[in-house]
Image (cartoon, rainbow, N blue to C red):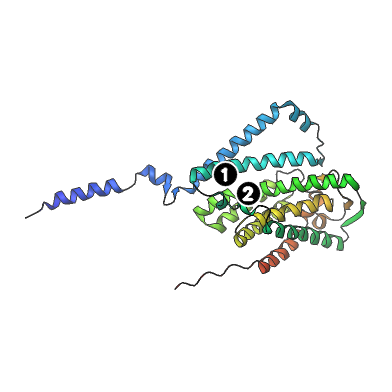
């Protein structure tokens, strides 16, 4: 019994064409579903839409609008800090929850597992943040760039502001860490790799800090470098909770405890009366200590200590 080979070849070609994905499918879909670039684009569009919606809502709620317009512009108002950072965190969190449903992934994959919230990694990050800020102020003081001039707030006033700034800078840490190193880092890394993504996002993190009033290039570079340390902690600990604690403690120490400018702003109700004096390379000038050259010294020292205390996990040997 013979077979028509040309007919068989034709059938195989038709079958192969039917099995091969269309160009449209190839553009949008990869081995793991929707490609990383499209997922990231959807997320960013959701963030922008929610941001615009929150601005619109706030501007049309007279009570909130009038309260915000009455706040001082030359200092950091504690209550406004809390309000603004809570809103900012929700703006980056809620779209991630939408993407979690679309992608059918557990939220923990975006580096902020709820079951670890305020667990040991968070509390381990806090002394690191305080240590970084304290070492920085010690180095500036050794070169006569920082003067402590007594207590600024005391008693119940100090307690009130301590609580407000603790909450406010906790949400600063949550917003900035998850916003730059949560869903975005996870998704971009799935497309181009962890460290290429880390370098890009750390550069962007530093760049957006240039939009802060009083910020300078060295301060923005410091912010980007801090972002790399935060991503290093993500790589070693598996979550962002260490970085959230470290970030919150650094800002709290700078703003409330040592009472020096934070990206050009001084806090209201700060604990200390203090002043910075000397050349900008030493003190950071109007930017504050994060603009000092010693900020890179402290960052390097704390990075080495972190690598020592949190070594990379050994890879299992292949059989």
Q: Position of residue 184 (x, y in %)?
A: 57, 48
Q: Position of residue 114 (x, y in %)?
A: 62, 50
User: What residue is shown with label 2?
Assistant: 178
Label 1 crowd bin: few (<14), some (14–19), many (20+), radius 10 Å: many
Q: Going 14% across and 50% down the picture, which residue do you hit?
A: 6
Q: What secondary structure is marked by label 2? A: helix
Of the numbered discs in the image, which one, if any, rests on residue 156?
none
Q: Up-down: is 172 above or below 59?
A: below
Q: In the image, 84: left or right of 76?
A: left
**CB contact under 8 Å: marks 2 and 1:** yes
Q: In which quadrant of the rendered image does the N terminus lie?
A: bottom left
Q: Going 34% across and 46% down the picture, which residue do you hit?
A: 21
User: What residue is shown with label 1?
Assistant: 96
Label 2 crowd bin: few (<14), some (14–19), many (20+), radius 10 Å: many
Q: In the image, 224: left or right of 1?
A: right
| Badge 2 or badge 1: first in the primary sequence | 1
Q: What secondary structure is marked by label 1? A: helix
Q: In the image, 35: left or right of 23?
A: right
Q: Find the distance from the CA under tag 2 to the CA under tag 1.
A: 10 Å
Specify the farthest residue to the left.
1
Give the quarter of the image for residue 134.
bottom right
């Amino acid at each position: 019994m013979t077979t028509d080979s040309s007919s068989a070849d034709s059938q195989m070609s038709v079958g192969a064409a039917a099995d091969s994905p269309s160009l449209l499918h190839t553009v949008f879909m990869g081995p793991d579903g929707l490609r990383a670039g499209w997922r990231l684009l959807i997320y960013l569009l959701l963030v922008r839409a929610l941001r615009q919606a929150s601005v619109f809502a706030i501007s049309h709620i007279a009570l909130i609008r009038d309260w915000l317009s009455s706040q001082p512009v030359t200092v950091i108002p504690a209550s406004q800090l809390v309000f603004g950072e809570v809103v900012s965190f929700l703006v980056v969190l809620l779209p991630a929850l939408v993407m979690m449903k679309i992608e059918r992934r557990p939220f923990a994959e975006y580096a902020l597992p709820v079951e670890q919230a305020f667990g040991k990694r968070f509390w381990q990050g806090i002394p690191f943040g305080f240590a970084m800020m304290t070492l920085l102020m010690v180095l500036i003081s050794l070169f006569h760039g920082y003067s402590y001039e007594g207590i600024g707030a005391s008693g119940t006033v100090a307690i009130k502001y301590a609580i407000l700034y603790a909450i406010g800078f906790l949400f600063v840490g949550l917003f900035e860490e998850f916003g730059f190193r949560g869903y975005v880092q996870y998704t971009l890394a799935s497309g181009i790799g962890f460290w290429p993504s880390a370098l890009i996002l750390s550069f962007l993190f530093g760049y957006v800090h240039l939009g802060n009033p009083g910020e300078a290039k060295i301060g923005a570079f410091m912010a980007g470098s801090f972002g790399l340390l935060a991503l290093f902690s993500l790589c070693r600990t598996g979550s962002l909770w260490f970085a959230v604690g470290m970030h919150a403690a650094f800002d709290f120490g700078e703003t409330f405890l040592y009472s020096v400018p934070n990206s050009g702003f001084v806090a209201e109700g700060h604990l200390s009366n203090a002043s910075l004096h000397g050349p900008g390379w030493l003190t950071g000038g109007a930017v504050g200590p994060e603009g000092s050259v010693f900020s890179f010294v402290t960052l390097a020292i704390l990075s080495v200590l972190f690598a020592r205390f949190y070594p990379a996990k050994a890879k299992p040997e292949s059989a």
